Amino acid sequence: MAITRGAQTRAASIKATLSDNYLDIQSDGWAAQYLPDLMEKEAEVFGKRTISGFLSQVSATEAMSADQVIWSEQGRLHLSYKCEIQVAADGVVKITKNIDDVAQTTNHGVRVGDMVLLAGGGQTVTGYVSAINVNASGAQQTSATQYVTVLPYGGAALSNMNFADGDDTCTILVFGSEYSKGTTGTVGANEPSFTTFTNKPIIIKDKYEISGSDAAQIGWVEVSGEDGQNGYYWYLKAEGDTRARFNDYLEMTCIEAEKADDTSTILGGANGKIGTEGLFSAIKARGHQTSGVTGVNAATDLAEFDLMLAEFDRNGAIEENMLFVNRATALAFDDMLASLNGHGVGGTSYGVFNNQEDMALNLGFSGFRRGSYDFYKTDWKYLNDLSTRGGINLAATGDEAIRGIVVPAGTSSVYDENLGKNMKRPFLHVRYRASELESRENKSWTTGSVGAATSDLDAMEMHFLSERCMVVQGANNFMLMS
């Protein structure tokens, strides 16, 4: 079945004043013998048009007084690296990356005396680190600190354990150490690792303007809006729509914005490059995407969904998570969960889903538990609305079509550079510029001569401004569904 979209009312505000902005009595105009019956109440055909509300559910809001926010996130506790076998006969192993695929060119935590597990090629051996600071051939030196010598407990050399030279798919894990009697202590100490991230607030502005004459003109149509404005003055609705759209901009900016790349031609003059890291950008850079994990729609297959859980197991393993998804993904989740009910195949089961014959059938699920994880599903209007991400997703493909997002519940512990101590905060929070004199969270003010006169301009100007940014802590616990 195909659905054909009919003619729509005007979808967006425009700068011009046109004939179709006003009520037009058709036919013979004022010469008509009988005037039409005027339905003066404006019809609200799009329902609630605003999309804001996501951040209020999953984030906190905090003031800041600097040009940027800096925070640090803990590294992993245990020492695990990706490596390459250089000379299997001599046990020479080159450490190439940490377990999160970050290049490990020189510094690593493996020391002489460590007991390790070395896995690769479908096999695992237990080994002893007999030397570090060797070169690719195993000769001792001080500069080639990527190379270590691993002697297997079960054989004389790695070559006897079927490890071949050049094997670059290996992983090495330090799980303990062994020393002889009467020896000195461990040589070298490991420092805990952490990563520092920064983001900067950007200034967001909007404006509405109406002349004094138009502000004094009453219309025939009674207008209303999301902010409760109503009456027969068209500018009341226009100003309210501008305000509502600006509030949506504040949320969409925190979701969609990106930092300018080093190669970008966008310049910010004396303030540096333009841009700020939004939620989607942070997850793409530091989190996960389902297409990168499974390559298919994880909501349609429980086995594919389990691959998402495996990614969470490798990271923070946050027990409770929220799913904010578009309509198609929400229905796919419902169908997947309903298909697990064997009595419901080919028909509808009453008891299992708490449905009864004399009640409306409930075919939706608001949450479910899989393994040790709880998921709570919510439809996200932003991903469905044709005038926001819903329209963009129709034109996008692959990783660029965002079907949903998995957001961890709870808080994270991070080191705050401004306060100089560890803080418990939600994984998401919005920072806005503020001081004792000025708060730039969501400012609005009026200028002109209409109402309270502030200038000789025969108009009313409504100004809107905010300066804010999004802080995404622990992005490795988030996942985009594309």
Image (tube, rainbow, N blue to C red):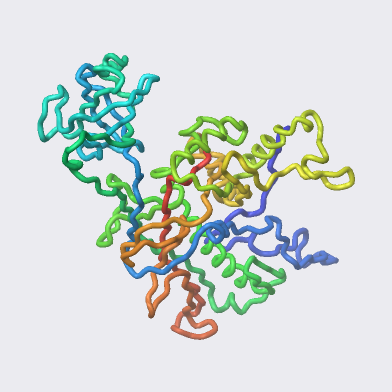
Of residues 444 and 201, the one nearer the viewer is 201
Q: Residue furthest front?
A: 181
Q: Residue at x 55, y 61 (%)?
A: 56
Q: Position of residue 461 (x, y in %)?
A: 49, 74
Quarter holding the N terminus is top right
Q: Position of residue 292 (x, y in %)?
A: 46, 34
Q: Position of residue 238 (x, y in %)?
A: 59, 67
Q: Residue at x 50, y 59 (%)?
A: 59
Residue 226 as seen in the image, left or right of residue 154:
right
Q: Residue furthest right?
A: 358
Q: Decide: is 217 above or below 259.
A: below
Q: Decide: is 155 above or below 289.
A: above
Q: Quadrant of residue 127?
A: top left
Q: Quadrant of residue 89?
A: top left
The number of discs equals 0
Q: Decide: is 319 above or below 240.
A: above
Of residues 6 and 86, the one nearer the viewer is 86
Q: Position of residue 144 (x, y in %)?
A: 15, 32
Of residues 41 and 92, the one nearer the viewer is 92
Residue 171 as seen in the image, left or right of residue 22:
left
Q: Residue at x 10, y 35 (%)?
A: 142
Q: Residue at x 51, y 31 (%)?
A: 294
